[in-house]
Image: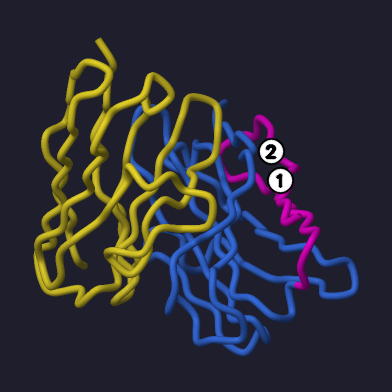
Amino acid sequence: EILLTQSPATLSLSPGERATLSCRASQSVSRYLAWYQQKPGQGPRLLIYDASYRATGIPARFSGSGSGTDFTLTITSLEPEDCAVYYCHQHNDWPLTFGGGTKVEIK
Amino acid sequence: QVQLVESGGGVVQPGGSLRLSCAASGFSLSNFAMHWVRQAPGKRLEWVASIRFDGANKYYADSVKGRLTISSDISKNTLYLQMNSLIAEDTAVYYCAKEKSPRANTATSAFDSWGQGTLVTVSS
């Protein structure tokens, strides 16, 4: 099973600041890595697919990079509505797995 | 637009059964692989089961194999998860999710639409 480790667990930043979230895989997932945003009481929302492609309707302040085992989600200028938990997800191999999440708090 | 609405959750005793439904609209289940993903309270997302767009292949997490069964009814455009021999560890919010790429092998693309989830509680 491919283990996805996300860091940090919590990120507390002010509006306008840059957020950098990390996802590390225990073995290569090529570029089959997605990022989701989840707010309380809601299902996840796809932000980034295939490591670096923004999903439909996602603002340009969200970007993804990486391949193999190391991936990054960057939010260039935080907005209050970005307060959420962010999960990475690999679909390179079975079983499909998710990271433990990074909670982004807005000061 | 694409919409997924789960139903069928509730409280069930250990060893009991439940069937979850996911009504899809805005697209046809016959064109997309579908998945069930669950989230226990305060825990990470956990993949549960997947079905290929044509129903030809089904995949299960080891933790649910032999107890949970994924299926779909194309005529009703509805995805199901039959849950038998339930245990406390199955307590979670269950989400259905649609893959992004049409008519592709299962799990070749990310999940671009999710439902709001339905809560299953296994307790005596």
Which residue shows up at 30% across the image and 53% down it? Answer: A98
- The location of residue A45, given as percent across then percent down, is 49, 46
Crowd rating for badge 1 (residues with CA inside 10 Å; few <14, some 14–19, many 20+): many
Chain A's colour is yellow
- The location of residue B97, given as percent across then percent down, is 57, 57
Which residue shows up at 34% across the image and 32% down it? Answer: A85
Number of numbered tags placed on the structure image:
2
Q: Amino acid at mark 1?
A: Glu
Residue B35's quadrant in the figure?
Answer: bottom right
Q: Nearer the viewer, residue B34 or B90?
A: B34
Which residue shows up at 15% across the image and 64% down it? Answer: A66
- Residue on which the image places disc 2: B9
Q: Amino acid at mark 2?
A: Gly
Which residue shows up at 79% across the image and 61% down it? Answer: B26
Label of residue B112 in the image? none
Judging from the image, mark 2 belongs to the subunit labelled B
Q: Secondary structure at mark 2?
A: loop
Judging from the image, mark 1 belongs to the subunit labelled B
Residue A105's quadrant in the figure?
Answer: top left
Residue B26 shown in magenta:
yes
A28 versus B94 height, above or below: below
Left or right of residue A95: residue A4? left
- The location of residue B15, given as percent across then percent down, is 58, 45
Q: Range of the magenta residues?
A: B1-28
B79 versus B18 height, above or below: below
A53 versus B15 height, above or below: below
Q: Which chain is blue?
A: B
Foreground: disc 1 or disc 2:
1
Q: Nearer the viewer, residue B41 or B90?
A: B41
Q: Secondary structure at mark 1?
A: strand
- Residue on which the image places disc 1: B6
The residue most toward the right is: B75
